[in-house]
Image (cartoon, rainbow, N blue to C red):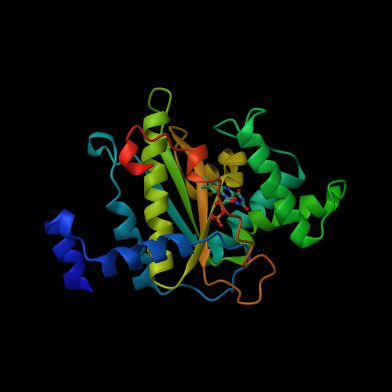
Amino acid sequence: MTQQITHSVQHGASTSSTAAQSFSDMIRSRHSVREFLSDPVPPEVIRGVLEDAQSAPSHSNTQPWLVHVASGATRDELSAEMVAAYDEQRFSPDFTDTYGDGPHQERARLHGAKMYGRLGIAREDREGRNEVVRDNLRFYGAPHVAMLFLPQLGDGVRAASDVGMYGQNFLLSLHARGYHGIPQAVHGMFADTVRKKLGVSDEFKLIFGIAFGTAKPDSQLFDLAIGRVPLSESVVLHDTTLD
Ligand SMILES: Cc1cc2nc3c(=O)[nH]c(=O)nc-3n(C[C@H](O)[C@H](O)[C@H](O)COP(=O)(O)O)c2cc1C
C-alpha cells in the first residue's frame, strides 16, 4: 500500500485505483462522534496526528494555526470552567455564528431535527437542549481536546480557511488510526474562558475545538449518518464531458 501511494505521488495520472478507493473509503467513512470512552489516546498517536495536521496547505505557507491540546486535569478544569460560563451566561465569542435564512439555515435545521429527534429531545425542552450544550462542553466525554486559534489578521478569512484545512487533516488522521473526533464551534462561544485557562494571548482568536478519543461503541448518535446534498446543489460543471 505504501508503495502504491508513493507511486501515485510521483505520477499523478497513474494513481493506483486501489489506493484511490481506500482513500475515498477512508474519507467517506469519517463522521463526527458525540460519545467517547474516557480511555486516553496513546501519546505517540497524538504526536502522529499533530504531525499529519501540520502538513496541511495554507496561504503562502503561512501556517497560521495555534493549537493547544488539553488532556487530564487541564482538560477537566477547562470543561468545568466552560460549563460554569455557560450556566452563568458568560459568552465571549470571537466570531459570529449565523447561517442566514436560506438553504444553509435549512440544512442546519434538518441536522438539529435529526440529532435531537434521535435523542428524543423536543424543540420546547429547554433543559434537555441545555444539557446537550453542556455535553458539548464536556467534550462529549472525550479525554482530549485540541483548541484551534488563529491570529487576528485582516478580516480573518484566509487564516480561517487554513485552519479549516488543518482541522480536516487532524480528523482524517485520527480516523485513519482508528480513533475519532468532532469539531466543536460551540467552544468558541467561551473564547475568553478558554484563553484564560490555557494562557493564550488575546491576539489569538478561538475558531473551534476538536474533541477526540475512542468512540463509545453503543452510542445512540454513532450512526447518525447525516448525509449531504447532491453535487448538483454545490458544484457547477463548466465541462460537458463531466455531465
Ligand atoms: C467547524 C465545525 C464546527 C462544528 N461544531 C459543532 C459543535 O459545536 N457541536 C457539535 O455537536 N457538532 C459540531 N460540528 C459537527 C457537525 O455538526 C458535523 O460535522 C456535520 O453535521 C456533518 O456530520 P459528520 O461530521 O458526521 O459528517 C461542527 C463541524 C464543523 C466542521
Residue farthest toward the top in the current orientation of the protein: 154
Q: Is residue 63 left or right of residue 126?
A: left
Say if 113 sits above or below 160 in the image. below
Q: Is residue 44 left or right of residue 208?
A: left
At a point 16% along the width and 65% down the height, the residue shown is: 6
Picture quadrant of residue 92: top right
**Residue 59, percent across and down?**
28, 35
Task: For the C terminus, give its image quadrant.
Answer: top left
**Residue 63, percent across and down?**
29, 41
Q: Is residue 145 left or right of residue 218?
A: left
**Can residue 98 be spotted in the picture?**
no
Say if 121 sits above or below 201 in the image. below
**Residue 100, percent across and down?**
64, 28
Task: For the N terminus, give its image quadrant.
Answer: bottom left
**Can residue 137 be spotted in the picture?**
yes
Residue nearest the observer in this picture, 218 or 4: 4
Residue nearest the observer in this picture, 174 or 37: 174
The number of numbered discs placed on residues in the rendered structure image is: 0
Residue nearest the observer in this picture, 30 or 229: 229
**Residue 239, percent across and down?**
32, 35
